Image: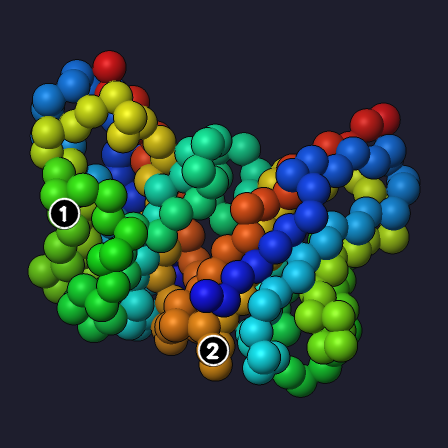
Amino acid sequence: DAGVIQSPRHEVTEMGQEVTLRCKPISGHDYLFWYRQTMMRGLELLIYFNNNVPIDDSGMPEDRFSAKMPNASFSTLKIQPSEPRDSAVYFCASSRQINSPLHFGNGTRLTVT
Amino acid sequence: AQSVTQLGSHVSVSEGALVLLRCNYSSSVPPYLFWYVQYPNQGLQLLLKYTSAATLVKGINGFEAEFKKSETSFHLTKPSAHMSDAAEYFCAAGGTGFQKLVFGTGTRLLVSP
């Protein structure tokens, strides 16, 4: 079990650029979650998928954020255009059931200058 | 809305002292409860979980938590703190009454020599 794999680990970009974060969940996990963590706001759920279908995107902050899950083994979170206030650590997590323990990736630290 | 409250954003203990991190949840139905630990530059890792089998739950690294329905609490304890326990700890609740896993705001544990 390789765990949840996120890439890149670090991303530094300039304001206005497009950013794409990637996630490979654990095989056999039907749920995938995207979280954002900042000092000010803590851990925020952005969106989650069940069997590749977005179920709840109420946490997505703005239309600049979008997430896709084209298949059971891959998901992306895209920010276009990026802004300095998007700087945060973005985590992907997966689980077998909605209330099963979550398995987190090591996160992507995004810095927007 | 269902919620999870962690009292104290920071807790400081001396090495060898008792660790007590507090967590309360709001739900009329006992939920599933979890404690996660986050070390610097890493994702959250499951420490232990309560799923109604036993009120005292033992986790990894010598931690345990007790579910008290009358107090709607799920406090995390460890008899003797180690320097390696310094991390941020998150309580989370899910299950009936919770549409999705709800996290507390986290408690940073500081351990001094």
Q: Amino acid at mark 2?
A: Gly
Instruction: Name the residue furthest front.
Output: B1
Please tell me in which quadrant of the rendered image residue A32 appears: bottom left
For mark 2, what is the residue?
B97
Residue occupying image coordinates x 24% and y 15%:
A113
Asked whether the residues under the numbered discs 2 and 1 touch, taking CB atoms below 8 Å apart as contact, a structural biologist would say no
Reply above or below: B74 against B39: below
Q: Secondary structure at mark 2?
A: loop
Where in the figure is residue A108, as x and y percent of width and height?
32, 35
In the picture, measured across the screen, residue B108 lies left or right of residue B31, that is right
Classify 10 Å Cα crowding around label 2: few (below 14), some (14-19), many (20 and above): some
For disc 1, the chain is A
Between B55 and B79, the one nearer to me in the picture: B55
Where in the figure is residue B73, as x and y percent of width and height?
71, 66
Reply above or below: B33 against B14: below
Residue occupying image coordinates x 31% and y 57%:
A33
In the picture, measured across the screen, residue B106 lies left or right of residue B95, that is right
Where in the figure is residue B3, as x and y percent of width and height?
53, 61
Q: Amino acid at mark 1?
A: Ser
Specify the quadrant that holds the C terminus of chain B: top right
Please tell me in which quadrant of the rendered image residue A13 appears: top left
Q: Are marks 2 and 1 on the same chain?
A: no
Circle 2 or circle 1, nearest the eye: 2
Reply above or below: A102 against B14: below
Where in the figure is residue B102, as x and y percent of width and height?
47, 61
In the picture, the disc for residue A100 is: none
In the picture, measured across the screen, residue A15 lies left or right of residue B102, that is left
For disc 2, the chain is B
Residue A10 in sight: no
Between B41 and B67, the one nearer to me in the picture: B67
For mark 1, what is the residue?
A66
